[in-house]
Image: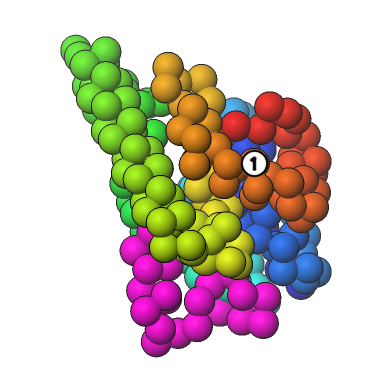
Amino acid sequence: MYQLYYCRGKASLTPHMLLEELDVPYQLVPIDVKNNQHKTAQYLALNPMGQIPLLIDLDVKITETAAICLYLSDKHPEKNFAPALGTTERGLFYKWLFFLTSNLQAELMIYFNPQHYSESDKAGVKMRAYENISGMLDLIENQLVENQSFATGPYFLDKHCSAVDLMLLMLSRWTSDLAYPARVRPCLNKLLNLVVSRPAVIRAFNDENIVAPYF
């Protein structure tokens, strides 16, 4: 049985949703980040970086949200949460999954934690991060418009919901209080509503006591 170490609403929400979608046995292990439970010796013995999420599969420990999503998707290929290896579609899957984790998530972390990057110009750091986030969300919106032109979809990559859609929903939640959040972009809003209507996604949200509005 998988074990997912998670914290409510954090990046661990993506593999949590994916585990529900895969319909496989797993156990949730809550970690109280506010009380620094992720910095305890017990947790650091499992994940020396002290970060969330962490997936344990027997004697294998997987960290990093994108890595966990790839690991789970490849272990359960029949569920179609990642395109087949060696295909063009798989290349696009890599492109967008790592764009989300390496760019959008990274800028959101800067936006919410400007003090980690500058003590003297926190407002400036936050503004630059906001501008970058807005540009990335616009890029995603433009890609969705292009997808419509080629009659692909209804999900981000094709007719199948993938780990990219789940990660995009998780990160879009983080933008909910921004001046120009993800949901104001028409195509992105349509996609997010489609993903959040999935029963497995709702089950994960219920597990974490996440209530509407979801993004």
How is the protein colored in the picture? rainbow
Q: Nearer the viewer, residue 100 or 38?
A: 100
Q: Which residues are magenta?
A: 74-97
SS for tag 1?
A: helix
Q: Which residue position is annotated with label 1?
A: 193
| In the rendered image, the vertical position of residue 137 relative to residue 144, given as above or below | above
Which picture quadrant has residue 81?
A: bottom right
Which picture quadrant has residue 34?
A: top right
Q: Main secondary structure of the magenta part?
A: helix
Q: Position of residue 185 (x, y in %)?
A: 46, 33
Q: Position of residue 117 (x, y in %)?
A: 24, 28
Q: Nearer the viewer, residue 189 or 99?
A: 189
Q: Is residue 190 visible?
A: yes
Q: Is residue 80 magenta?
A: yes
Taking the image as shown, residue 214 lies to the left or right of residue 61, namely right
Task: Please tell me how crowded label 1 is: few (under 14), some (14-19), or many (20+) other residues with Cα within 10 Å.
Answer: some
Position of the C terminus by quadrant: top right
Q: Is residue 75 visible?
A: no
| In the rendered image, the vertical position of residue 117 relative to residue 41, given as above or below | above
Residue ranking furthest to the bottom: 86
Q: Nearer the viewer, residue 201 or 194?
A: 194
| Point 34% across, 63% down: residue | 95
Residue type at mark 1 is Asn
Q: Position of residue 56 (x, y in %)?
A: 63, 67
| Point 73% across, 34% down: residue | 210
| Point 67% across, 54% down: residue | 17
| Point 73% across, 28% down: residue | 212
